[in-house]
Image: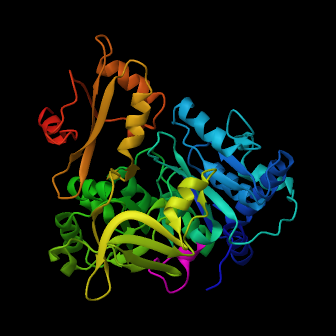
């Protein structure tokens, strides 16, 4: 199938539907003509600051229309963007900037796109230098948890995103789509919420709060006609429990990122039988989704849980010794500046996920667990080894171990617990503040306990069961 560049797809929609609403941010609508023209002018400025093919531009902006314009502008220069959460601690951001070596940082403390309204950017009428790019070029970098304590930068090409929205695929994006945008910009799900509508002529509605709440979703549906939303499995369960009426009016609900809860799925389907509910599966290295499964009532009673589904367009799934390997157009180009890790995980045009799975008699993929320590908690992919590496690097800490605390459903985890040994005066509050200066908020363990020693089993391994019993 043909592959496309994100920015060229958006530009084509601006020609086809210039007056259609592209973005709604805090009640203010921006049409495609204005968005594309503003991004052209911003791209011209970025190019003068050194942005271009082969470079990575760091973007530190809150969610909103200016962020959308800036990311589109970066792509128009031929560069790739890395959206860095403004809430991340400075030490972590410093690590990421070292890896990116950006020619320019877009944000309040650097090149500041907030200095003009989008209409003012559009009125400048500037154009960036012409760039002959392809869909294989880098489009964005997503930083994910690494086992060494240093985040890994996943370099994702244009084709990895645009292949998701191919005609005939399971994701029904088009000119009528009005999608809620609530994910943090640093997540790959942000690409789904943003580029899904914009590359197909739909509308992006930016949720106003840092954390999407049921009443906020309901307000967006009522006020702006939102008909499509993505929720992590944890958030989906919470909404079903707290305020299921918030889903009223939605035509498509996409969920995933963690093992789904059949009881919550069942309650949703009984309440909203006409709403399309999809389970999406895929690591960051394959950009949002590698498989999708349209969930039906019969799935609730499956003994192996809700299926992961079948491959999305231009994607392949192979099981090698029970481990899920993914290939196709969604594959990342590798890890930024880390050829060793790239060679380890990307082999023979396949990505080794570390997830275990199986195919049922219909050829549908199911999840069976992990082959390593990686866990998903509240939609975040976390390597306990990264947290242990950071903790061990703090002078007073002698020993430490991070233990995922199991959730109520098999194969799920509700939080992280960190146990450590250190001299008197190095209490949990002290350690929490040290970790918060380096790790993103979601990776700072919920529970931190100072213990006299780390217990071990008779075979010399950490006795995680005994540690969990101390909680």
* Magenta segment includes 165: yes
Q: Is 204 placed left or right of 291 in the picture?
A: right
At a point 75% along the width and 42% down the height, the residue shown is: 104
Is residue 176 visible to the viewer in this orientation of the structure?
no
- Part of the protein shown in magenta: 162-174
**Quarter in which the C terminus is drawn:** top left
Closer to us: 70 or 246:
70
From this view, report whether residue 190 is shown above or below residue 135: above
Instruction: Please state the horizontal and vertical placement of residue 174, each as a whole percent of the image.
Output: 55, 77
- On the question of residue 246 being in view, the answer is yes
Q: Quadrant of residue 94?
A: top right
Residue name at image x 39 percent, y 50 percent: 380
Where in the figure is residue 415, as x and y percent of width and height?
A: 27, 43
Where does the image place residue 338, in percent across and percent down from the top left?
60, 51
Residue farthest bottom in this picture: 362
**Seen in the image, is 287 located left or right of residue 405?**
right
């Amino acid at each position: 199938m043909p592959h496309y560049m994100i920015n060229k797809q958006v530009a084509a929609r601006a020609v086809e539907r210039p007056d259609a609403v592209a973005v709604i941010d805090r009640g203010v609508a921006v049409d495609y003509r204005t968005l594309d023209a503003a991004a052209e002018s911003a791209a011209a400025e970025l190019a003068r600051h050194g942005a271009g093919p082969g470079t990575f531009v760091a973007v530190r902006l809150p969610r909103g229309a200016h962020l959308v314009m800036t990311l589109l502008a970066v792509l128009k220069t031929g560069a790739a963007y890395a959206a860095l959460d403004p809430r991340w601690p400075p030490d972590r951001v410093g690590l990421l900037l070292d890896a990116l070596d950006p020619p320019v940082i877009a944000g309040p403390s650097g090149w500041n796109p907030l200095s003009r309204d989008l209409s003012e950017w559009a009125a400048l009428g500037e154009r960036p230098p012409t760039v002959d790019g392809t869909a294989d070029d880098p489009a964005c970098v997503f930083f994910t948890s690494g086992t060494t304590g240093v985040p890994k930068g996943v370099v994702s090409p244009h084709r990895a995103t645009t292949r998701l929205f191919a005609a005939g695929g399971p994701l029904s994006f088009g000119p009528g789509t009005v999608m809620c945008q609530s994910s943090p910009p640093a997540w790959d799900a942000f690409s789904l919420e943003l580029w899904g509508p914009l590359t197909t002529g739909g509308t992006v509605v930016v949720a106003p709060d840092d954390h999407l709440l049921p009443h906020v979703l309901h307000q967006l549906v009522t006020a702006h006609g939102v008909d499509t939303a993505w929720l992590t499995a944890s958030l989906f369960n919470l909404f079903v429990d707290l305020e299921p009426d918030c889903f009223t009016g939605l035509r498509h609900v996409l969920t995933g990122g963690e093992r789904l809860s059949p009881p919550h799925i069942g309650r949703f389907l009984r309440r909203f039988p006409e709403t399309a509910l999809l389970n999406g599966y895929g690591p960051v290295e394959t950009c949002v989704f590698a498989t999708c499964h349209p969930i039906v009532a019969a799935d609730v009673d499956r003994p192996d849980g809700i299926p992961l589904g079948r491959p999305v367009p231009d994607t392949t799934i192979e099981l090698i010794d029970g481990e899920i390997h993914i290939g196709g157009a969604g594959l990342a180009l590798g890890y930024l500046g880390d050829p060793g890790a790239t060679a380890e995980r990307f082999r023979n045009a396949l990505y080794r996920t570390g997830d275990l799975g199986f195919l049922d008699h219909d050829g549908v993929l199911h999840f069976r667990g992990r082959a390593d320590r990686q866990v998903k908690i509240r939609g975040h992919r976390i390597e306990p080894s990264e947290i242990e590496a950071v903790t061990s690097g703090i002078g007073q800490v002698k020993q430490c171990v991070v233990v995922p605390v199991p959730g109520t459903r098999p194969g799920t985890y509700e939080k992280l617990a960190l146990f450590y040994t250190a001299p008197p005066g190095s209490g949990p509050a002290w350690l929490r503040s040290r970790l918060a200066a380096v790790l993103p908020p979601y990776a700072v363990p919920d529970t931190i306990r100072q213990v006299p020693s780390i217990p071990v089993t008779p075979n010399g391994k950490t006795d995680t069961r005994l540690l969990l019993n101390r909680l």
